[in-house]
Amino acid sequence: MWVHNLNPIFLNLGILQIRWYGLMYVLGFLFVYWYARRQIRAGSVCLTEQELDSWLSWAVAGMILGARLGEILIYRLEYYLANPLKMIAIWEGGLSYHGALVGIVLAILLWCWKYKKSFLEIADVFVVPISLANSFGRIGNFINGELPGRLTSVPWAVKFPFVEGWRHPSQLYEAFYNVIIFGILCWQSGKKRKHGVLLAAYLMMYAVFRSITEFFREPEIFVGPLTMGQFLNAIMFVVGAGLMWWVMRKKDRSGAR
């Protein structure tokens, strides 16, 4: 068992503080950027490096806005209504994964519509590095000491600050399964497939893994017998399965590679 005493501040410059949480998101962004440039140079996606910069700016804006709105509206509306200035304090944590996903998807759809690009082709490329970038975010959650797991007596239990008892390090469980998803998507990315298959597979895999880890994560809100995470994951799985069914039935018009 281990007592969590990690400092969430990576670098303190007085009026400026660089936190591990924000640093993890920067590392995730840089990995997505590196991976995407590598795919562009390999001719695996219909983008130029100049278009990549535009795409990423849209995606990051959609992610941050969606993640924050998801956290505010789904999980902690009363708190943020009572503390409105805290709505913009994203460096303190508090970003909803499902909100981020919706925000990114909407931003990419709008970008693809504006620049006349294939949403499914582009999504299949970016979903691979994004799956690993999710792990960086969960490590940031762990360093922050937020989103602790349920009470447990397992040998690797952690005593987090501000909560009683020994807890599952559920943030690290989530980081681990995102690495697994990344490995599977990397393995499949080099195979001949229809556009949309990797996106659908990601949605379904994430929904299943996240629903399992919800049994080890301290629940915040319940929707009937399900935690809010499991409820949103069920919707996510249905969307992924529906997309997979639609893609596999769709006639191949040079959409496979």
Image (tube, rainbow, N blue to C red):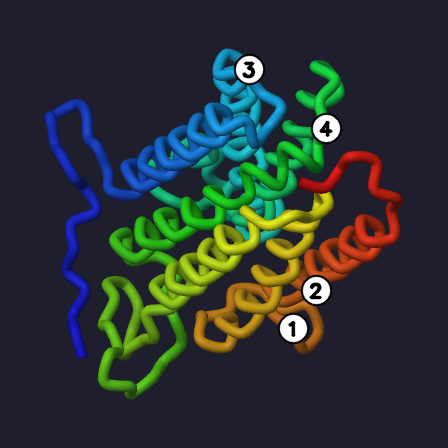
Tell me the distance, in whole angstroms, between the alpha carbons under discs 2 and 4. 27 Å
Q: Residues within 10 Å of mark 2 (few under 14, many from 20)?
A: some
Tell me the distance, in whole angstroms, between the alpha carbons under discs 3 and 4. 13 Å
Q: Is residue 147 left or right of residue 160?
A: right
Dot 3 or dot 4, earlier in sequence: 3
Locate residue 119, reporting x and y percent: 71, 32
Q: Are marks 1 and 2 in contact (CB under 8 Å)?
A: yes
Q: Which residue type does callout 1 highlight? A: Leu
Q: Is residue 116 above or below residue 81?
A: above
Locate residue 112, reporting x and y percent: 70, 23
Dot 2 or dot 3, earlier in sequence: 3
Residue that extends furthest to the bottom in the rendered view of this protein: 153
Query: In this figure, which residue is indicated by the disc labeled 4?
Result: 118
Q: Are marks 3 and 1 in contact (CB under 8 Å)?
A: no
Q: Residues within 10 Å of mark 4 (few under 14, many from 20)?
A: some
Q: Which mark is residue 234?
A: 2
Q: Is residue 82 above or below residue 58?
A: below
Front residue of 17/20: it is 20
Dot 3 or dot 1, earlier in sequence: 3
Query: In this figure, which residue is indicated by the disc labeled 1?
Result: 226
Q: Can residue 85 be seen in this snapshot?
A: no
Q: Is residue 75 above or below residue 41?
A: below
Quadrant where the image shows the N terminus: bottom left
Tell us which disc is closer to us: 3 or 1. 3
Q: Is residue 140 left or right of residue 40?
A: left
Q: Quadrant of residue 30?
A: top left
Q: Which residue type does callout 2 highlight? A: Ala
Dot 1 or dot 2, earlier in sequence: 1
Secondary structure of the residue carrying numbered label 4: loop
Q: Are marks 3 and 4 in contact (CB under 8 Å)?
A: no
Q: Quadrant of residue 33?
A: top left
